[in-house]
């Protein structure tokens, strides 16, 4: 293990006031809340004493404490989940922070472990997980960030538009972002001085672009991509169906 990464932890950012699905972390998914299911997947990747929920909501705080999660309270001024991570790490002082979004209730723990191991081998680098796009509907969806990368797996750009495009406007191949990130403490410290979103981050609504715009390289690692992120109401039904299939 990289000696600089003595303290590694997963931080799950969670806010109550979601614009598309208010109260999203507490949505019931077959008897358990979304945030609890996400936390349970995370503690399969790292011990529970290395997994934290970061929130500005006392409602979410109480709920998480009730099922045994560790909680770090943050301000309500955080621009994104990454900003919430940076603020939480002022308390936690982790050397390597693994961000798993709180709306990933069926995330594969093995994918989280893949990102952790890859980050440990790439000293000081930001890491983001990706997966191949196999369906054109995903390629066309504005809910799914598409990824363009170098042959050495460095992030070139990420967009909600269908990229890479071509003159025929047909789906050829593509990669999608999976919301598992690894941030060295220094990278999170870098954005502490930023008081607003960067231009491309703002227009695309993709927070990893801020690091790219600040000139910080991002390494990409391919994972299984079996997860379903919950962004809109129809995603809730997809996840419930998947959970019932897994737990039957």
Image (cartoon, rainbow, N blue to C red):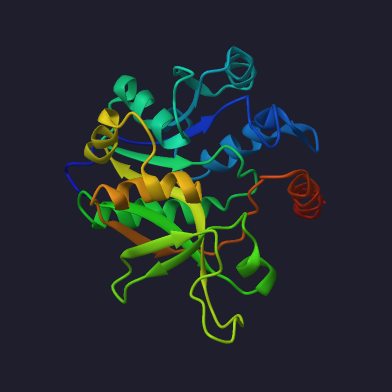
Residue 62: % across, % down: 61, 14
Question: Residue at the spot x=63%, y=22% of the render?
Answer: 67
Residue 126: % across, % down: 30, 50
Residue 208 seen from this side:
no
Residue 83: % across, % down: 39, 31
Q: Is residue 189 left or right of residue 71?
A: left
Residue 141 seen from this side:
yes
Q: Is residue 87 left or right of residue 237?
A: left
In the displayed structure, 13 sits above or below 137; it is above
Q: Is residue 191 left or right of residue 98?
A: left
Q: Residue furthest bottom?
A: 168
Q: Is residue 114 left or right of residue 246?
A: left
In the displayed structure, 85 sits above or below 116; it is above
| Closer-to-camera residue (239/82) | 82
Quarter occupied by residue 31: top right
Quarter occupied by residue 154: bottom left
Question: Residue at the spot x=61%, y=40% of the render?
Answer: 103
The number of numbered discs placed on residues in the rendered structure image is: 0
Question: Residue at the spot x=76%, y=44% of the render?
Answer: 236
Residue 85: % across, % down: 40, 31
| Closer-to-camera residue (166/151) | 166
């Amino acid at each position: 293990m990289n000696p600089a990464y003595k303290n590694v932890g997963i931080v799950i950012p969670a806010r109550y006031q979601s614009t598309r699905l208010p109260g999203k972390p507490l949505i019931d998914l077959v008897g358990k809340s979304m945030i609890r299911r996400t936390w349970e997947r995370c503690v399969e990747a790292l011990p529970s004493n290395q997994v934290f929920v970061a929130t500005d909501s006392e409602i979410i705080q109480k709920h998480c404490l009730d099922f045994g999660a560790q909680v770090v309270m943050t301000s309500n001024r955080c621009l994104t989940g990454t900003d919430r991570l940076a603020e939480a790490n002022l308390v936690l002082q982790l050397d390597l922070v693994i961000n798993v979004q709180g709306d990933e209730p069926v995330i594969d723990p093995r994918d989280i472990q893949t990102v952790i191991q890859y980050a440990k081998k790439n000293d000081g680098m930001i890491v983001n997980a990706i997966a191949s796009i196999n369906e054109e509907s995903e390629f066309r969806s504005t809910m799914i960030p598409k990824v363009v990368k170098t042959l050495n797996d460095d992030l070139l750009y990420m967009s909600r538009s269908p990229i890479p495009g071509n003159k025929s406007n047909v789906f050829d191949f593509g990669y999608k972002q999976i919301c598992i990130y690894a941030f060295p403490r220094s990278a999170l410290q870098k954005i502490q001085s930023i008081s607003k979103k960067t231009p491309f981050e703002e227009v695309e609504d993709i927070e990893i672009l801020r690091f790219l715009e600040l000139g910080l390289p991002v390494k990409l690692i391919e994972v299984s991509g079996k997860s379903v992120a919950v962004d809109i109401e129809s995603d809730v039904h997809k996840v419930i169906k998947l959970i019932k299939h897994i737990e039957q």
